[in-house]
Amino acid sequence: MKRKRFIVMTSDEKTSRSGKVYSKRIQRLRRLIVATVIASCLIPTCICIILSIKYDRLHSSYEQSRTDLNWYRDKYGTEMEILAREAEEKAEAEKIASAEVENEESVSMDVDYANVEVSGAQNPEDIEGTRYVYLTFDDGPSSNTNEILDILAEYDVKATFFVCGKPDARYTDVYKRIVDEGHTLGMHSYSHKYEVIYDSAVSFKADLDKLRVFLYETTGVWTKYYRFPGGSSNNVSTVDMHELIECLNDGDITFFDWNVSAGDDKSGSNKTTIYNNIVGNVPRFKHCVVLMHDAADKKATVEALPEIIEAIKEMDDTVIYPITDDTLPVQHIK
Ligand SMILES: [Zn+2]
């Protein structure tokens, strides 16, 4: 028979055991309290760190976009300003166009382009053979210039741009591109304001110098070619044009008029009339200086350009060149 074992505890032992249990509970409770305290400190700290990192990231991207926006605004202005400027450019182009229509009409009565005295080619030995065609664009740069340059690049054709003074930052690269891609940079007055340019020889010279220096600072090219707004045969000028030609001679500048005109400054002109005016008249000459316009409202010129180039390239013994020092000028007045 098994003997039951009884453990008899003394009252001291009982007290010490319940004390141990009690102290274990206290310890557990203490750990719990410490853990709670630590957690209640750590969690908000972690949240704070995470939030501050996120804030920093957001802040720096905000700063970056603010910098980008400011840069963009500095360069191009606000959207409203861009729209206003485009409208202004269009209005200016229309003003130039209407002034030139008036002028061209008076010019066309005075000058028969077929009888403009020019040699058949740029070198005497070429007179019999090659036809030289010089595509020239007046009034730029404009919102169309890059597209014109793209087309010229596509057909590997070099042209001549008679530009005005447009200090707007968006055109800086356009002036440079004209030069970098091997086209000739010519002058067409800084202001294109007839009342300024043709008021006196002094104001003509001031406008001319302003543009020449501006183009030099923008592109590094000291240009030597000029096209009078309205041509040398304009009858707007209150100054004898020979006096203004003297100003050009003093600066070693040659002026170029034209003997073939796109007619793209005439109201009602469109892709077809522009094409016909050029492609129909080029065969009449061995030496063609073709007048076209590079302006915001002359989209039809850009549209007609690829087919014009293709048609000229298909003509026998015909080359398209940019104006150089070797080019014989077409001049309406001597
Ligand atoms: Zn013009």
Image (tube, helix red, strand yellow):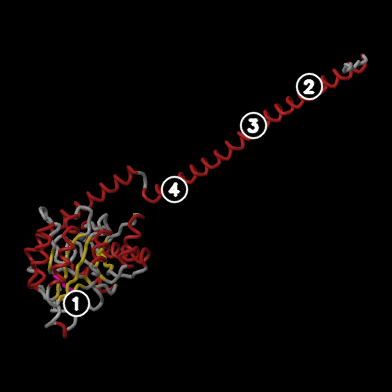
Quadrant for the C terminus in the image:
bottom left
**Are circles 3 and 2 on residues that touch, CB within 8 Å?**
no
**Which mark, residue 328?**
1
Counting every numbered tag in the picture gives 4
- Please, is residue 313 above or below residue 151 in the view? below
The residue nearer to you, when weighing 64 against 50, is 50
Q: What's the CA distance linking mark 2 and mark 4?
A: 63 Å
Which residue has dot 2 on it? 25
Secondary structure at numbered mark 1: loop
Q: Which range is magenta?
A: 328-332
**Are circles 3 and 1 on residues that touch, CB within 8 Å?**
no
Q: Amino acid at mark 1?
A: Leu
Task: Tell whether circle 3 marks a residue whose Cβ is less than 8 angstroms from ligand 1.
Answer: no
Q: Amino acid at mark 3?
A: Ile
Secondary structure at numbered mark 4: helix
Report which quarter residue 220 is drawn in. Answer: bottom left
Q: Position of residue 114 (x, y in %)?
A: 7, 71
Considering only order in the chain, which callout, 4 or 2, is on the residue closer to the N terminus?
2
State ligand 1's quadrant. Answer: bottom left
Q: Position of residue 212 (x, y in %)?
A: 32, 66
Q: Amino acid at mark 4?
A: Asp
Report if residue 250 lies within the magenta region.
no
Mark toward the viewer: 3 or 4: 3
Report if residue 329 lies within the magenta region.
yes
Which residue has dot 4 on it? 68
- Please, is residue 236 above or below residue 183 in the view? above
Report which quarter residue 314 is drawn in. Answer: bottom left
Considering only order in the chain, which callout, 2 or 3, is on the residue closer to the N terminus?
2
